[in-house]
Amino acid sequence: MEDIIIEKVERKSKIELPDNLVFGKIFTDHVFEMDYDASKGGWQKPTIKKFENLSISPAAMVFHYGQAIFEGLKAYKQVDGRIALFRPEKNVERLNRSAKRLCIPEVNPDLALKAIIELIKVDKDWIPSKPGFSLYIRPFIIATEPCFGVRPADNYKFMIILSPVGPYYPEGFLPVPIMVTDKYVRAVKKGTGDCKAAGNYAAGLLAQAEAKKEGYSQILWLDAIEQKYIEEVGAMNIFVRFKNEVATPMLSGSILPGITRMSVIQLLKDWGYNVSERLISIQEIIDAYDKGELIEIFGTGTAAVISSVSRLKYNDKVLQFSDTTSGELATKLYEELTGIQYGRIEDRYGWITFVE
Ligand SMILES: *Cc1c(COP(=O)(O)O)cnc(C)c1O
């Protein structure tokens, strides 16, 4: 594997982070960058260098035909000062799955993981140590070839950027109101919904903006064919706790296979819960609620880890849970996952990779 060239920039002033770190607004001093050039045989020299604006042709294919994919993971400063990553190899694997689907050349997974680790080492002073804070890692690949032609590009840029972040919801670990929509769809089976493709998120913005106007912070999407079965939230998978079962939609092809989702399923199984991955219709959820057999609903994803649902609206029906207190199981999962991430709880699954 090729060595990563490191061009370190010296910073003159001390890093100062505001107390109320807004998610994803501040970036560190360095980036990882590697270009792909088909005419030169593939991926070129991997480099860590200064974070600065890019110079890209306005004709770059990413701007016109949307060949863009990304990932999201976090580095945590543990209680003993060590820097931990949570299942980063899964993010690299998923990046390459997304790449394949969007006709983007795959990256060497070992190199990608090493790139993440080396970049964090260079910018490690940026990792906040306050509880609930972390360094968000954003790998992405875009098509840079300047050309009007709808075909896979011959040039790409793979970058990793870092952003120190506070808790995802400024109010803290509070339940969120969610609206179910059947007016728009996010993704359809055999499409790109199971990839972290940039275009998926643009497609969801209008529905999200309309939900905001009604006081809901996220959309819960239904399947695109029948608009009957729940799929997932904007950037979270969804779990429904019924009286005798914890269910999550099965990976049907239009749902993003979340790493938090995968970890939650494992934890629940090991704790003895009856967990299932299956079709869950919105009607089943309403019926269970009306019978008093719906205990809690929560979302799972890297950014917020676990988010309880306070209110779920579907047409004229509103299912009301607590606005102020997260569900019992959601809280237990949040404590367990963040416990493992911050080193308060033993990593019995081998989920943690230490940066150094
Ligand atoms: C990233 C993402 C998730 C959560 O995935 P994690 O790997 O748990 O962070 C869920 N749904 C969508 C649409 C996403 O983009």
Image (tube, rainbow, N blue to C red):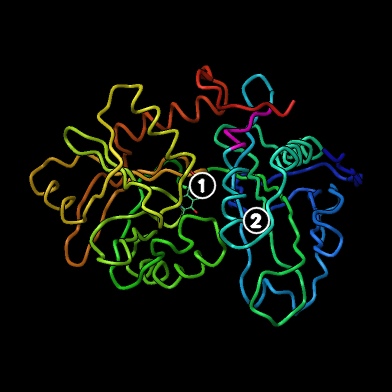
Q: Position of residue 293 (x, y in %)?
A: 13, 40
Does residue 125 appear anywhere in the picture?
no
Mark 1: few/some/many CA within 10 Å (<14, 14-19, 20+): some
| Amino acid type indicated by mark 1 | Tyr
Q: Residue drawn at (7%, 45%), measured in percent from left and top?
A: 291
Return the residue at label 2: 25
Q: Residue drawn at (78%, 41%), measured in percent from left and top?
A: 119
Residue 144 position (above or below residue 118)? below
Q: Position of residue 88 (x, y in %)?
A: 61, 37
Q: Residue drawn at (55%, 29%), measured in percent from left and top?
A: 341
Q: Residue drawn at (52%, 46%), measured in percent from left and top?
A: 303
In the rendered image, the residue lying farthest to the left is: 291
| Amino acid type indicated by mark 2 | Lys
Mark 2 or mark 1: which comes first in sequence?
2
Nearest to the observer: residue 286 or residue 143: 143
116 sits to left or right of 12: left
Q: Which quadrant of the figure has residue 300?
A: top left
Tell me the SS state at disc 2: loop
Magenta residues (range): 83-89
Count of numbered tags: 2
86 inside magenta stretch: yes
Return the residue at label 1: 168
